[in-house]
Image (cartoon, rainbow, N blue to C red):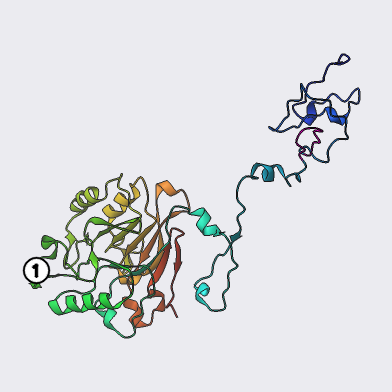
Amino acid sequence: MPVAAGEKKPAAASYEQLDMSDKPSLTELAAASDEQLDMSDKPSLTEPAAASDVQLDMSDKTSLTEPAAASYEGLAMSEKPSLTFACVSDTHGAHRSKDFKIPEAAASCEQLAVSGEPSLTLACVSYTHGAHQSEYFRIPEADVLLFAGDAGMDSGGSKAAFDAWLSSIPHKHKIVTLGNMDTFINEGPGNAEAEGCIQLKHGTVVCDSIVEVDGYRIFASPWTPAFFGAYQLQSEEEARAHWSKVLPPNSKNDILMTHGPPHGVGDTANGRHVGDKELLRAVQALETPPLLWVCGHIHGSYGQHVVPHPALGDGKGITLINAAIQYVYQGHTGASPRVVQLPSGAVTQPHAS
């Protein structure tokens, strides 16, 4: 639309909205960003257009002579502090090497991604049956020891020996649940499940309850389907009643530690699956799946597995560590203890060779 003499042409909302038919001066172009200037009562801008949209010479006004932002994103971030990132992945333990050097940075990519969630390393062990006293048994360094049952505490002497071993290792937190072979109670053998948990001086024993470590909620339970020893669920009906009580769908646990594995995952013995069907059902019904699940009991299925969970989608699931280490002493180095780092979920096996 033509503009009458002396009338100022309205600012274009964008470059595409300029009517170039009468070749207007570029000085009539207002800034196309939120920083548009109201020039209605100011002199006309007769100087040549600034080199960028934000470098306007305002004559008797404050001159915007600072360098233009390198990009609109850079302009938007102008009031935010500069931050550098050192990005690292897949060290597989090599970060402990004296030759590994990481550049200085204000934050790491991992720290940025998991802001608010503390980092925690967990050494996972089960089914030692007294072998933890062997000079050949090596447990990796970690913040937390997760012991998923079957230390073999079937007498006062074996209980004292396990407690002494716990006192000898440097882990800050030692979380223990029991297994079917941990039958000793107080000063003599007895019905372990009737008496509750075996108590230790140098470890926190957890049976069907939750303990919190550095902000992570750890649920642990010693119960398995009927086989032999203590903490036996005699039928699927009994198992269903038990797991629905201690693991209701709305329970929130970051880590599960059960002595036995779920049915179909990490539970193969003599060519068939012997895990707990009702335990699997209860965990898959959890509204919030755990970050990690540690078990033992079925020593031939040691290793890292994945338990499907509907909340995690296809191809994803809960990391399950069957931490039984009994086969280490038969030359199976793959059964050596694993270390899990949370919240990333990275799994390493420091003593696999």
Please give the name of the residue rendered at 49% of the width and 73% of the height, measured from the top-left corner. Answer: 93
Amino acid identity at mark 1: Gly
- Quarter residue 86 falls in: bottom right
- Above/below status of 167 relative to 113: below
| x, y percent for residue 308 | 40, 53
- Quarter residue 132 falls in: bottom left
Q: Check residue 95 for magenta coloring.
A: no
List the single residue furthest toward the right: 22
Please give the residue where the numbered disc 1 appears in the rendered image. 190
- Above/below status of 150 relative to 134: above
List the single residue furthest toward the top: 4
Q: Check residue 63 for magenta coloring.
A: yes
- Quarter residue 301 falls in: bottom left
Please give the name of the residue rendered at 88% of the width and 29% of the height, measured from the top-left corner. Answer: 46
* Front residue of this view, candidates 207 and 76: 76
Q: Secondary structure at mark 1?
A: loop
* Front residue of this view, candidates 93 and 2: 2
- Above/below status of 255 relative to 189: above
- Residue 251 is left or right of residue 38, and the answer is left
Quadrant location of the C terminus in the rendered image? bottom left
- Magenta: main secondary structure equals loop
| x, y percent for residue 45 | 84, 29
Magenta span of residues:
55-64
Quadrant location of the N terminus in the rendered image? top right
Q: Residues within 10 Å of mark 1 (few under 14, many from 20)?
A: some
List the single residue furthest toward the front: 60
- Residue 110 is left or right of residue 77, and the answer is left
- Residue 62 is left or right of residue 167, and the answer is right
| x, y percent for residue 247 | 27, 50
Is residue 76 something that shows in the picture? yes
- Above/below status of 145 relative to 23: below
